[in-house]
Amino acid sequence: MKNKGRYCVIGVMSGTSLDGLDLALIEFVLDNKKWEYQLISTTTKSYTEQWKKRLTEARLMKPEQLALLDLNYTNFLAEQIQLFINENSDHTIDLISSHGHTVFHQPEQGLTFQIGNQKQLADLLQHRVVCDFRVQDVALGGQGAPLVPGGEFHLFSEYAACVNLGGFANISLLGDSSPIAFDIAAANLIFNFYAHKLNLAYDAGGAIASKGKIVKPLLDELDALSFYNEALPKSLGVEWLAQNVTPLLSSYEQESIPDLMHTYASHLATQILKVLPDSGKILFTGGGTHNTFLMQLIQDKCSAQICIPSDTIIDFKEAMVFGFLGLLRSLGQHNCFASVTGSSRDHSSGVIFEIF
């Protein structure tokens, strides 16, 4: 793609918490060797219960079922992105950068797979598409995650660290030369699981968790999970959750849901606090940032300055950053750091589908 200094990009993100499909229209400008951004338009397309069921069950499907789901999900993405383009028809789009939806993430087995990364996405939209960001990094011996630090390093360099509270919590420690980043623990996936048992989409503001009390034996077992002491680089997937956390929580199902949620919030806050810098500004984003109970647990014991941005940045930062990662890939610039994923080298990751 021609280097022109100003680009209009659509970033598309679907997270493990299944809140919906986040779309962001962003203008990126390279000014005096520094990238600036302006969020022009954002929207979230909530998943129907049918789509939530399909995406939840995807990792259990037979290959032919998964192939069909991949096709259907790509069509779904194209429909939603086209609607978003129509709503913003006064802007000329340079490219669309889409994360897809993760079904498998087992980098230790050399496996990561996201659906929705088919060439038909570009064919249907008639726009350049960049997607499938994780596969190359895993092939180079990396974790394939987290990838967002590749964008945060350029766009949020005024912060000592960035913490994202999505389905999983992760952190980027932003140094002068290259970031260090890793997954911390499961986050909204746990809170939403218990909220669903109460016929709620999520625990608004952490209100339910705040009414509970700590179940000390469970807290001790959660804090003792071996992942927290593993060396970097490291990342998490739903497979790890199913093997290590879900059975543990199930063994305490006699406890009340508020108590279980309160205990998990305390556990998550502890794990986050263990990895935060002692000073500087720390940016918190992702849906979990709206959990005021969790955030208070963190703020009460954090010596650094916690920064909570606008709701738009909280909810759409990842979509925006994936838009930027796609732009870097199109420009042939590195968007993935070996210091983050453990890959054999820094590289420019993502598959580009052109329209001819």
Image (cartoon, rainbow, N blue to C red):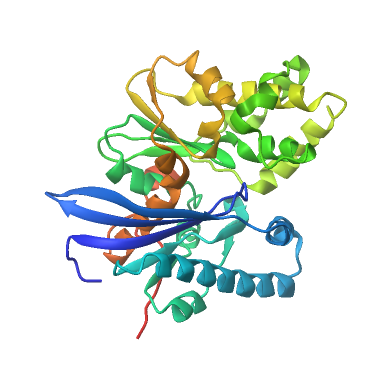
Q: Is residue 35 left or right of residue 45?
A: left
Q: Residue at x 40, y 42 (%)?
A: 313
- Would residue 207 be seen by someone viewing this image from the given angle? yes
Q: Quadrant of residue 212?
A: top right
Q: Considering only vertical position in the picture, is 214 above or below 21?
A: above
Quadrant of the rendering where the C terminus is positioned: bottom left
Outermost right residue: 254
Is 222 in front, or is 87?
Answer: 87
Q: Position of residue 272 (x, y in %)?
A: 52, 26
Outermost left residue: 32
Is 185 in front, or is 38?
Answer: 38
Q: Quadrant of residue 245?
A: top right
Q: Position of residue 41 (x, y in %)?
A: 38, 55
Q: Residue at x 25, y 62 (%)?
A: 7
Q: Considering only vertical position in the picture, is 93 above or below 302?
A: below
Is 49 in front, or is 158?
Answer: 49
Q: Residue at x 66, y 47 (%)?
A: 238
Q: Is residue 212 left or right of residue 354?
A: right
Is 27 in front, or is 332?
Answer: 27
Q: Considering only vertical position in the picture, is 311 above or below 66?
A: above
